[in-house]
Amino acid sequence: MLQSDSLEAPRPCPLCRTTDTHLHARAHGRAYYACSVCGLIFMAREARPSPSDEKARYETHENDPADAGYRAFLSRLADPLLELLPAGAAGLDYGSGPGPTLSVMLEERGHPMAIYDPFFAPDERVFDRSYDFITCSETVEHFFRPREEFERLYGLLRPGGWLGVMTRFVTDRDFETWWYVRDATHVCFYRTETMYWIEEQFDWTLHLPAPDVALFQRAGG
């Protein structure tokens, strides 16, 4: 049983690390906290799924490169990113999942791709090089330690490179009944203001080309 709200110690935000947080909602037997600094909403640590539960959930995803509907969904990130990339730019699909598809789509457009996924493509040799762009499609909501993850992604990008993120942004919808919250592997939820906080923190330039899509450019290049 979760502790009463009045007895809980402040929950540090896993993105900006402040303790200026408060209980935001309880849904599906889990508590979620909101950060007053960066705007992140995050699941209570004790409610996070185990690695085996995470992997079992991901294995239910039917990600097929031959699925036209899935390709259309991924195009919401791929299309605006492709408009910004020079010919032959090399990329990394970070969080490629059990059926890598975005990397296939980008390779079809002439961009050599590496993939990484902690469960399905765990070869960490991909971290020994840098990239012109990195994609994170439906990935950042799974980050237990988003601060460390974004720091890693920043370090993997070449100057002038692009980070493409797609995740469902928090809006004024009812959080407790939002379908995106039902998935127990979704532990972080980002507002538009959270993306602007990330932009400022890492000295990136943020573009918001479509709903639920954020493109960050690293300075330089």
Image (cartoon, rainbow, N blue to C red):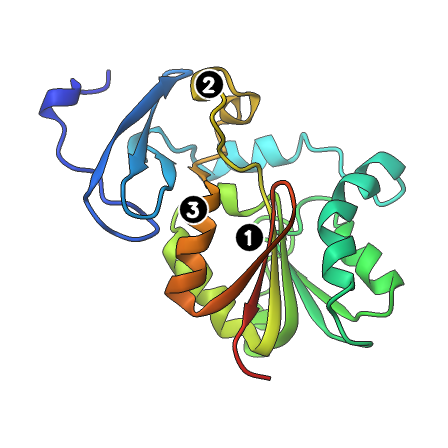
Q: Is residue 161 visible?
A: yes
Q: In the displayed structure, would residue 121 be above or below residue 56? A: below
Looking at the rendered structure, the kind of residue marked 2 is: Asp
Q: SS at mark 1? A: loop
Q: Is residue 143 visible?
A: no
Residue depth check, mark 1 versus mark 2: number of the one nearer the observer? 2
Looking at the rendered structure, the kind of residue marked 3 is: Glu
Tell whether 19 sits left or right of 77. Answer: left
* Residue receiving disc 3: 193
- How far separated are the C-alphas under marks 1 and 2? 32 Å
Q: Earlier in the sequence, mark 1 or mark 2?
A: 1
* Residue receiving disc 2: 174
Q: SS at mark 3? A: helix
Estimate the x, y position of residue 113 in percent, counting from the top left.
74, 67
The residue positioned 50% from the left and 41% from the top of the image is: 141
The residue positioned 59% from the left and 72% from the top of the image is: 125
Looking at the rendered structure, the kind of residue marked 1 is: Pro
Tell whether 32 sits left or right of 184. Answer: left
